[in-house]
Image (tube, coloured by chain):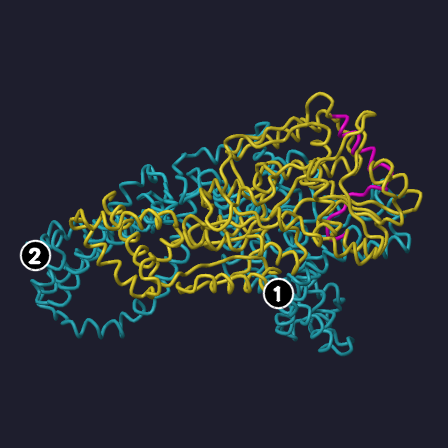
């Protein structure tokens, strides 16, 4: 086995050397030569032959892409999944990718699969899933665990780990190993507001915002009965929720001493009826109707808010809120969209190159220009156009208080119910400590 | 029951006789299939039998043996993959896929069972040939055998294809599902990257024990009770509603009956999921119905009588357990009544007019006619379909899921800890468990229980309604 690998390596090196030497020689000739060379080296590998090829071999071995091109003789069949909204752009990028490797014949199929539900489709049958797919970073743990992500041991066309924002790279990693290519950095949440109602000082504190909104007879919306958002209160107040090393169960201290103050704070905030618990779709209609003047949501609602509020449309980091008389900065989940490579792909090498292409600086810039999605790439993000976008700069401001979403499946349902109970003012009058204890029991439940 | 046992007894007795009284060729057939045919000069039949045996042996060695060898453990070699950054290619080890092992083993076991039955049939057939020869009866040649497949044995020819279909589409998947209930197949043990293995009755125990963290037992009871309540309510409301509607439309005083009927059928023509999603939006907390109710003061009225809790500014149509259950049943009436109306229209038109006429002459009022003649007739004719509807409602995924998904949040923490909701049916809970949490093993367990419940209901009610000649009773 080892011998065969060595032989193939040498053979490809020779071919690459041949290419370098002959300059203009076309690649059909080169590939035709490969089996012959292979056979020769496998048979005996005469000393002088090996010596002759050593110098170019060293050069060529350092360039795996050239190796791969040389080793590719058949059509490369790949399947790519991108979201419905990303189809046009991805088609264009795929054409560019094909053009970048003119010597290789590609047969690339593009499928539509939302980033938010990619996991559900992929985990149904990993082997049948796409070779390259886009997904939201909260799914990375389950995908890695199911063996649906190829570790990014090295990158070829650009340095994934250093050219992207540190948060994005962290979000694309599990246990310090990089598993995906950051594509966008805009999947987190922050505060949208109508600047004709709130001043920049008002939006620093949630209590102040409620006061101002109440005076204006308007409402502030947040999806409190949703684990994703309620996290911002508990995390902000310093209580921990994290994923255990087993990758499925959680550690949660939301019932530790003093945590009842956070629960009480959420009840107090919603008690006035100004801060309302509301799902994303309802928010969209009510922003348009004008009843809501501020909301905690993500870039996907930027357009709705901008249309409704016009020039007064503004966005900023999340405010502070008071826990037992002390101001706490609301935390959040940062969110990234990533591109992953399926290890069950027949063409892992080409899949990795394609994933790199879809996430390089030029592609991320194109994605921002075409769809207004915030780039994870540092160079792309530093452009003036990106900086001028209120939603994306609000996300950047929130980034300091945001953490990547690392949580096991048992978190969602109990946390959702906790939010529901607190936002409706704890109608059964359950003791807050008992309430939190039951929630934590559910969140930290062993996974059978 | 006794009949069935006798039949099984005879089945095995016949092989015994074949063995005891068969000549050397019949006995040889036990090892070399087809020997008995060769002896009676049925060469082609013999070759076919021999071929089947050879194929079976090849199948055993090449397919069944390697899979069944791992059936006890469901595989031991974990998936491993090494990526070479230099050549950009990856090598994968020869790993075990627990699910494929399970699937292939079950298929193998099934094939072996089929072969055994085939072998027994063969033994009997060659013994019968021996008897025929001894009695000097005519022995078919191959051509005559083939012809008989199109004449006296035509039912066998006809049923072969459907039988294979039922086995492939129903029996084998059900066997796999049942097997999964006894394994630990879930998110931590998902092939191809991880292995799963047998855990015996553990999953069933988990379902019925109610510990603090695993609240499966608690949730299961709650969900089961609501499933049955729902199935009864949904079935009878749409049934009665459909009959009444059909009666009204068929009534001689109703003007333009065809138009009314068409209007209701149009409601069916719109895909159900579209209707349900629209209705969900109408009845959302900030939806159009709520806006209307609060503007006419209904919301405040309901608050004052205590049907809506005082801290709400809307009617929680689909977000409060009590309200949601009532709304789901009502919306289901609206969605389901047109179907029942169609069925009822057909049946009502066939009620013998003379019965109703004579009842009227005897002085029965319309209500009495309805209760004494129409309803018994309806129940008799539609009884079996009523039972089917009941079972269908136990598994009525659409209405519940589409109306409450993403809208309904449970306030019961114990239910939440098991990913269940008050309005969940067993089937929607099962869907959430598999689709959102990949808990295939528990889903299988619940699936088996749902099957048992449905099968029991169907069996009991069918035997009761169809038993005897009830046709006389209502006439």
Dot 2 and dot 1 within a common chain: yes
Determine if residue A423 is in view. yes
Q: In the image, residue B73 lies at what x, y percent?
A: 33, 37
The chain to which mark 1 is attached is B
Q: In the image, residue B386 lies at what x, y percent?
A: 59, 59
The chain to which mark 2 is attached is B
Q: Earlier in the sequence, mark 2 or mark 1?
A: 2
The residue carrying mark 2 is B25
Q: Colour of chain B?
A: cyan
Q: Residue at x 36, y 40 (%)?
A: B80
A215 is within the stretch colored magenta: no
Q: Residues within 10 Å of mark 2 (few under 14, many from 20)?
A: many
Q: Colour of chain A?
A: yellow
How much space separates mark 2 and mark 1, taking CA atoms?
A: 62 Å
Q: Secondary structure at mark 1?
A: helix
The residue carrying mark 1 is B377
Magenta stretch: helix, strand or loop mostly: helix
Determine if residue B160 is in view. no
In the displayed structure, does residue A2 sit left or right of residue A163?
Answer: left
Mark 2 in CB contact with mark 1 (< 8 angstroms): no
Magenta stretch, residue numbers: A260-282
Q: Secondary structure at mark 2?
A: helix
A274 is within the stretch colored magenta: yes
Q: Is residue A406 above or below residue A54?
A: above
Image quarter (top left, top right, bottom left or bottom right) of the C terminus of chain B:
bottom right
Q: How many marks?
A: 2
Q: In the image, residue A177 lies at what x, y percent?
A: 49, 37
Residue A416, image quadrant: top right
Q: Is residue A108 above or below residue A54?
A: below
Judging depth in this view, the residue of B149 and A350 nearest the camera is A350
């Amino acid at each position: 086995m080892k011998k065969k690998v060595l032989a193939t390596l040498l053979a490809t090196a020779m071919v690459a050397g041949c290419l370098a030497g002959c300059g203009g020689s076309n690649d059909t000739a080169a590939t035709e030569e490969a089996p012959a060379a292979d056979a020769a080296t496998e048979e005996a590998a005469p000393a002088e032959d090996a010596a002759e090829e050593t110098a170019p071999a060293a050069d060529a071995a350092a360039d795996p892409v050239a190796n791969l091109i040389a080793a590719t003789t058949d059509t490369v069949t790949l399947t790519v999944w991108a979201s419905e909204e990303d189809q046009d752009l991805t088609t264009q990028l795929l054409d560019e990718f094909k053009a970048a490797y003119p010597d290789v014949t590609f047969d690339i199929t593009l499928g539509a699969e939302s980033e938010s539900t990619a996991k559900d489709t992929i985990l149904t049958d990993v082997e049948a899933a796409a070779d390259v797919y886009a997904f939201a970073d909260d799914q990375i743990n389950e995908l890695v665990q199911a063996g649906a992500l190829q570790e990014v041991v090295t990158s070829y066309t650009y340095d994934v780990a250093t050219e992207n924002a540190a948060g994005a790279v962290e979000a694309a990693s599990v246990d310090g190993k990089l598993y995906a290519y950051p594509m966008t950095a805009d999947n987190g949440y922050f505060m949208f507001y109508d600047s004709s109602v709130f001043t920049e000082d008002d939006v620093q504190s949630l209590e102040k915002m409620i006061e101002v909104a109440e005076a204006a007879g308007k409402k502030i919306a947040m999806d409190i009965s949703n684990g994703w958002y309620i996290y911002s209160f508990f995390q902000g107040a310093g209580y921990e929720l994290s994923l255990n090393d087993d990758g499925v169960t959680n550690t949660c201290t939301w019932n530790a001493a003093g945590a009842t103050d956070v629960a009480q704070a959420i009840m107090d905030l919603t008690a006035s009826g100004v801060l309302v618990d509301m799902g994303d779709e309802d928010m969209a209609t009510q922003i348009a109707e004008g009843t809501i003047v501020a909301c905690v949501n993500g870039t996907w609602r930027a357009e709705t808010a901008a249309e409704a509020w016009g020039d007064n449309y503004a966005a900023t980091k999340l405010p502070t809120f008071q826990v037992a008389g002390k101001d706490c900065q609301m935390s959040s989940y940062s969110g990234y969209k990533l591109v992953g490579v399926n290890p069950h792909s027949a063409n892992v090498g080409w899949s990795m190159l394609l994933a790199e292409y879809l996430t390089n600086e030029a592609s991320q810039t194109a994605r921002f220009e075409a769809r207004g999605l915030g780039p994870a790439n540092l160079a792309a993000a530093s452009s003036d156009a990106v900086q001028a976008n209120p939603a994306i700069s609000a996300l950047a401001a929130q980034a300091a208080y945001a953490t990547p979403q690392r949580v096991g499946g048992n978190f969602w349902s109990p946390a959702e119910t906790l939010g529901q109970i607190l936002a409706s003012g704890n109608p059964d009058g359950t003791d807050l400590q008992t309430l939190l204890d039951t929630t934590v029991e559910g969140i930290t439940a062993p996974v059978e | 029951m006794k009949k069935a046992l006798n039949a099984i007894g005879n089945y095995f007795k016949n092989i015994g006789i074949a063995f005891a009284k068969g000549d050397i060729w019949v006995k040889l057939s036990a090892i070399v299939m087809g020997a008995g045919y060769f002896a009676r000069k049925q060469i082609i039949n013999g070759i076919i039998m021999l071929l089947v045996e050879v194929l079976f042996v090849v199948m055993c060695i090449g397919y069944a043996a390697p899979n069944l060898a791992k059936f006890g453990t469901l595989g031991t070699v974990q998936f491993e993959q090494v990526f070479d950054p230099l050549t950009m290619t990856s090598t994968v080890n020869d790993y075990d896929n627990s699910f494929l092992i399970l699937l292939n083993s079950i298929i193998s076991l099934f094939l072996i069972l089929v072969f055994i039955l085939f072998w027994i049939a063969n033994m009997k057939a060659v013994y019968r040939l021996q008897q025929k020869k001894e009695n000097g009866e005519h022995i078919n040649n191959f051509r005559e055998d083939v012809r008989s497949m199109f004449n006296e044995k035509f039912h066998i020819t006809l049923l072969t294809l459907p039988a294979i279909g039922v086995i492939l589409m129903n029996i084998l998947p059900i066997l796999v599902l049942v097997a999964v209930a006894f394994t630990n197949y879930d998110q931590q043990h998902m092939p191809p990257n991880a292995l799963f293995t047998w855990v015996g009755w553990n999953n069933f125990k988990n379902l019925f024990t109610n510990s603090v963290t695993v609240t499966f037992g608690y949730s299961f009871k709650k969900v089961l009770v609501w499933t049955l309540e729902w199935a009864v309510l949904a079935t009878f409301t749409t049934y009665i509603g459909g009959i009444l509607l059909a009666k009204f439309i068929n009534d001689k005083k109703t003007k333009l009956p065809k138009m009314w009927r068409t209007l209701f059928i149009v409601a069916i023509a719109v895909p159900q999921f579209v209707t349900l999603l629209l209705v969900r939006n109408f009845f959302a907390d900030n939806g159009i119905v709520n806006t209307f109710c609060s503007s006419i003061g209904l919301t405040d009225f309901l608050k004052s009588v205590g049907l809506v809790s005082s801290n709400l500014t809307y009617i929680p149509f689909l977000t409060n357990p009590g309200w949601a259950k009532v709304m789901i049943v009502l919306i289901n009436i609206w969605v389901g009544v047109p179907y029942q109306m169609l069925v009822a229209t057909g049946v009502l038109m066939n009620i013998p007019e003379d019965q109703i006429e004579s009842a009227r002459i005897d002085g029965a009022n319309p209500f009495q006619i309805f209760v004494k003649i129409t309803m018994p007739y309806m129940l008799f004719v539609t009884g079996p379909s009523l039972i089917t509807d009941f079972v269908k409602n136990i598994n009525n995924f659409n209405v519940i899921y589409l109306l409450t998904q993403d809208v309904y949040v449970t306030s019961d923490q114990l239910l939440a800890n098991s990913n269940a909701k008050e309005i969940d049916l067993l089937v929607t809970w099962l869907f959430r468990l598999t689709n959102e949490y990949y808990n295939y093993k528990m889903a299988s367990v619940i699936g088996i229980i749902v099957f048992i419940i449905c099968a029991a209901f169907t069996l009991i009610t069918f035997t009761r309604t169809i038993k005897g000649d009830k046709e006389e009773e209502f006439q």
